[in-house]
Image (tube, helix red, strand yellow):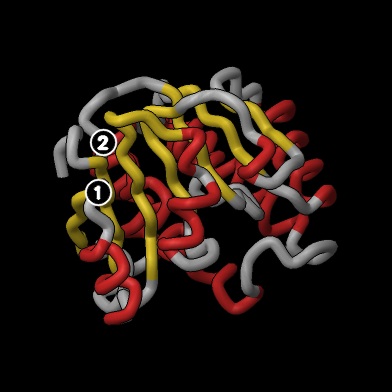
């Protein structure tokens, strides 16, 4: 997939105005990346594919058009800022590293992202419950589900981009009697997956 193809997919799905705001955010990331390592420098040339579309595709796996969304370990803004820019979800981004959190807040302020909140904290310190929880390659799935369990309800959907799913991770989920899950293939990388987890009271 080329960069133009990735951007065009976003325009078709979300419209030019919102995608222009994403473009402004990507420029901020590229500029800041020389000061702190927000994304791997080797991925800047494919930032639309590797980061923008890769983040936006999480919205394809939620049924509601709005609601409270928690993004754990947002880092350089992926997927949290992209989700906030392209949707009406009230997005709370949790980032424990102070410099990265300050960068996220600067993006929120400059782009006037009214539906985004930045918390400089670990997820264990977050209060409140959320309809959707995402985390882009943060910790193991088992540890993540435990650490953020207090932020979930019986209807929460966890949307977790992963690389290749290891057999150990899948086995641990299969042993968990409280949850059901399925795996979707990433549209930006045929070797990556997106893990969708619900409680058994919810729907997979």
Residue at left offset 49%, top offset 31%: 84
The quadrant where residue 131 appears: top left
Vertically, is 101 above or below 118? Answer: below
User: Where is residue 42, by image quadrant?
Assistant: bottom right
Q: Residue at x 81, y 41 (%)?
A: 102
- Please give the name of the residue rendered at 24% of the width and 64% of the height, measured from the top-left corner: 175
Counting from the top left corner in percent of width and height, residue 117 is at 64, 27
**Which residue is under mark 2?**
62
Q: Circle 1 — which element? A: strand
Q: In the shown orientation, is residue 90 left or right of residue 97?
A: left
User: Mark on residue 89?
Assistant: none
Please state which of the two labelled residues, at mark 1 or mark 2, is closer to the viewer.
1
In depth, the one of 155 and 80 nearer the eye is: 155
For the residues marked 1 and 2, what is the alpha-carbon distance in whole angstroms? Answer: 17 Å
Q: Is residue 107 above or below residue 29?
A: above
Specify which label sits upstream in the sequence, 1 or 2: 2
Give the number of callouts: 2
Question: Which image quarter holds the N terminus?
Answer: bottom left
Residue ID for mark 1: 179
Q: What is the secondary structure assignment of the residue under circle 2?
A: loop
Residue 36 picture location, percent across and down? 80, 63
Residue 1 in view (yes/no):
no
Contact, mark 1 vs mark 2 (Cβ under 8 Å):
no
Residue at 74% from the left image edge and 67% from the top image edge: 37
Q: Horizontal placement of 30 versus 3: left or right?
A: right
Determine if residue 158 is in view: yes
In this rendering, position of residue 120 left or right of residue 61: right
Classify mark 1: residues with Cα within 10 Å, few (<14), some (14-19) or many (20+): some
Image position, residue 141 (x, y; %): 42, 62
Which quadrant holds the C terminus? top left
Residue 59 vs residue 201: left or right?
Answer: right
């Amino acid at each position: 997939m080329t960069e133009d193809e990735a951007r065009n997919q976003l325009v078709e799905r979300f419209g030019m105005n919102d995608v222009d705001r994403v473009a402004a955010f990507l420029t901020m990331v590229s500029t800041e990346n020389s000061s702190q390592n927000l994304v791997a420098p080797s991925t800047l040339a494919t930032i639309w594919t590797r980061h923008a579309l890769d983040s936006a595709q999480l919205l394809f796996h939620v049924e509601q058009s709005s609601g409270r969304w928690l993004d754990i370990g947002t880092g350089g803004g992926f997927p949290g800022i992209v989700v906030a820019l392209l949707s009406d979800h009230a997005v709370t981004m949790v980032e424990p590293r102070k410099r990265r959190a300050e960068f996220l807040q600067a993006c929120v302020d400059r782009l006037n992202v009214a539906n985004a909140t930045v918390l400089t904290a670990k997820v264990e310190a977050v209060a409140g419950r959320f309809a959707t929880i995402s985390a882009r390659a943060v910790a193991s799935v088992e540890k993540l589900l435990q650490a953020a369990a207090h932020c979930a309800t019986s209807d929460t959907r966890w949307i977790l981009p992963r690389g290749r799913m290891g057999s150990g991770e899948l086995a641990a989920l299969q042993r968990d009697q409280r949850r059901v899950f399925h795996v979707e293939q990433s549209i930006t990388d045929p070797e990556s997956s997106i893990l969708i987890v619900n409680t058994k009271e919810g729907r997979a």
